[in-house]
Amino acid sequence: MSELEIEERSSPNHGERFAPIDILLLHYTGMPDDEAALAWLRNAESKVSSHYFVHKNGRVFRLVPEERRAWHAGLSQWGGVSDINSRSIGIEIANGGHPGGLPDYPKLQIDAAIALCRQILSRHAIPQHRVLGHSDVAPGRKIDPGERFPWARLAAEGIGHFVEPAPQDDGRTLRPTDHGERVEALQAMLALYGYGIEVTGEFDRKTENVVAAFQRHFRQAQVDGIADGSTQGTLQRLLAALP
């Protein structure tokens, strides 16, 4: 596509950064009206913002300068650290999300998002495996950008870390109430990849939420919080493919 044009739509909701930028975080707006979503991100009373907003028609707006700390991640964790707002650049992508029935992301919009991500990654030392969704850093609390977000398409364009999901293997499913060494191994692998999870050996609600978040990003065919063979195999493939 042609050179990406970025329009200025300033938001007052930002502050000082306290850490170097090493995460690119993608969201959906989850609102039925795109203009209302943009207005909310620019409203001082909302106390929320992002660095960029990508409209369905492909228009891109800059709301907060990249050197400033936008307020988009909330209570979150990745790789053992919190204050994801200080470490990240946030992109809000206009989409009704789960409240709106998970509509598809238009091609024009994803083309623009890819071009924007490329520009951001060219300016900052953000590893591909730290291009994340909001649900990755806040499992259970957030579920965006959702299981219809085309992570595979972004990866094909050089944006983010992704592998072909592993095939189903019913012989090693882990589910809520399970416990023991196999659950410990699953939790350890999820934590090694970056998810905020403790290795307890108990498949509790937090583990279920993290597994569902992982599925929304990396194994989208079935998001149920149950660590079936496909989910575990995909996680192993991702870890093996890390630099």
Image: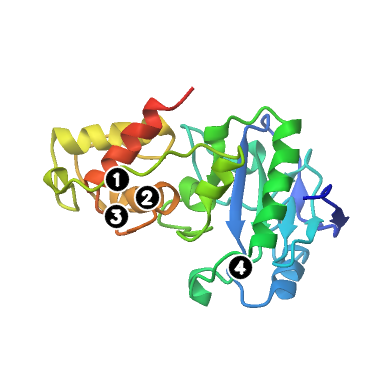
Q: Nearer the viewer, residue 21 or 216?
A: 216
- Examine the rendering and report whether any part of residue 130 can be seen: yes
Q: Amino acid at mark 4?
A: Asn
Does the residue at mark 2 contact the one at mark 1 (Cβ under 8 Å)?
Answer: yes
Q: Earlier in the sequence, mark 3 or mark 4?
A: 4
Splitting the image into 4 quarters, where does residue 85 fall?
top right
Q: Amino acid at mark 3?
A: Gly
Which circle's residue, 2 or 1, is located before the other in the chain? 2
Q: Which residue, given by chain and number where applicable, does mark 4 sit on?
A: 95
Which mark's residue is nearer the viewer, 1 or 3?
A: 1
Between the C-alphas of marks 3 and 4, the distance is 24 Å
Measured as percent of width and height from the top left, residue 130 is found at: 55, 36
The residues tagged by marks 1 and 3 sit, at their Cα atoms, a distance apart of 9 Å
Mark linked to residue 219: 2
- Mark 2 vs mark 1, CA separation in Å: 6 Å
Seen at 44% across and 34% down, the residue is: 194
Residue density around tag 3, few if under 14, some if 14–19, many if 20 or more, within 10 Å:
many
What residue sits right under mark 3 in the picture?
A: 225
Residue 43 drawn above or below residue 191: below
Using a 10 Å C-alpha cutoff, classify the residue at mark 2 as few (fewer than 14 neighbours), some (14 to 19) or many (20 or more): many
Q: Is residue 206 above or below residue 84?
A: below
* x then y, percent, for residue 117: 69, 43
From the viewer's perspective, is 151 left or right of 16? left
The image quadrant that residue 118 belongs to is top right
For marks 1 and 3, the one nearer the N-term is: 3
Q: Type of residue at label 1?
A: Thr
